[in-house]
Amino acid sequence: MTPERRARLMSVLNKRQNDLTVVMENVFDPHNISAVMRTCDAVGVQEIYVLNTKIPRHKKWGAKSSSSAAKWLTIHQFTDAQACFDELRKKYQRILTTHLSSDAIHLYDIDFTGSLALVFGNEHSGVSDEIRAMADGNFIIPQVGIIRSLNISVACAVTLYEAHRQKRLAGHYDQRRLQDPQLSALLAEWDLKEDDYDR
Amino acid sequence: MTPERRARLMSVLNKRQNDLTVVMENVFDPHNISAVMRTCDAVGVQEIYVLNTKIPRHKKWGAKSSSSAAKWLTIHQFTDAQACFDELRKKYQRILTTHLSSDAIHLYDIDFTGSLALVFGNEHSGVSDEIRAMADGNFIIPQVGIIRSLNISVACAVTLYEAHRQKRLAGHYDQRRLQDPQLSALLAEWDLKEDDYDR
């Protein structure tokens, strides 16, 4: 690995966050999946969960574009909700879903400096009742319009950037947050990938 | 108009903002256009500008979905950049483009409580040199990932929700901001539209 390439990869790895993840439950549109992944990469979310209980396992990740974020993320795929949550519970302290309910908290009232998994649901039916029952609560993104729903990749981006804003203020991007074993493994893995940077 | 319908439409009109707009320059993907419009509706942006100097005029707005935001927005279409900017200058005090440049300001350093037009560019080539030369400056959305670019509808959403966050704190959603003639005209226009709400 050239020093330049190592420096570039490390500059990204040094910003990756170990306490924030995104779960996509039965999200089926490749455009949405691809956009969510790009946003995860952009704010430093390394690990994401794809839970498909009602739609087939995805074969590819809208990866037509050479700049697909998928290859730079660690993607955990599940078809069983309980198995997915068992894994999430090992790594994240709180699991919140996007859902309009009377007890939902406001996006800006979420403390994103804590360990958090965020669940986004299917384009049409949202987060399932099953998943909501397993999670720790719901949150809503404030809206003042007539439609009252956002595209899922938009909802995810607004949420992750509020997380980014809070985490930045809390200094979460100022020092490395991945542990050494994970960081070394990712560096070795990334070194095998073609980098889009110089195209 | 039933009192209920009037109340619903007024509740949205009372949150519409008269000092914030979005300009889409040669954005061609209907998914992106549709998602941008939904986000505009969601944060109370009523008027948007579609400037197509390099791609054909759009015939429809990804309006397959009955919940398309397009019909609830005031859409100004231009094919001439100067004519578009002449109109923008009449209504907005500052015009910023999204562009990675050395003099670009940071999203979070923008004062969104002032009168502002935000220009988002083509999916591949971004905002054109021509438009950047006519604008008042560039801004960037902070990113710590390897890809270094966001989907345009994601970039717009992150920007508009930062505007929403600042404007909310500044009380811009607490009292009506549209002037009476515009509000009355929109109410009459909206009354003619089929409302998706009760579907």
Image (cartoon, coloured by chain):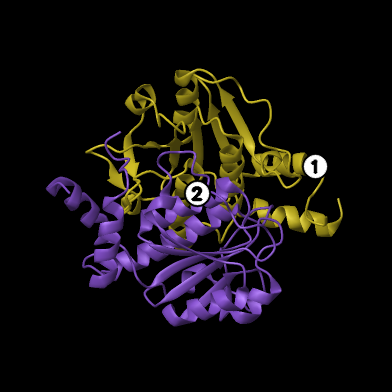
Chain colours: A purple, B yellow
Q: Which quadrant of the structure image shows residue B104? A: top left
Q: Residue at x 81, y 55 (%)?
A: B5
Q: Which mark is residue A35?
A: 2
Q: Which residue is the site of mark 1?
A: B193
What is the quadrant of the C terminus of chain A in the image?
Answer: top left
Is residue A178 visible in the rendered image? The answer is: no
- Residue B107 percent across, percent down from the top left: 35, 50
- Residue A186 percent across, percent down from the top left: 30, 61
Circles 2 and 1 on the same subunit: no
Label 2 and label 1: CA atoms lie apart by: 32 Å
Q: Residue at x 78, y 55 (%)?
A: B197
Q: Foreground: B13 or B96?
A: B96
| Number of marks | 2
Q: Which quadrant of the structure image shows residue A53? A: bottom right
Which amino acid type corresponds to the residue marked 2 in the rendered image? Ala
- Secondary element under disc 1, as helix, strand or loop, is loop
- Residue B120 percent across, percent down from the top left: 45, 36
Q: Foreground: A156 or A29?
A: A29
Which tag is nearer the camera, tag 2 or tag 1? 2
Determine the chain carrying the residue at label 2. A
Which amino acid type corresponds to the residue marked 1 in the rendered image? Lys
- Residue B121 percent across, percent down from the top left: 44, 32
Compared across the picture, whether B63 is left or right of B85 comes to right
Q: Foreground: B59 or A145?
A: B59
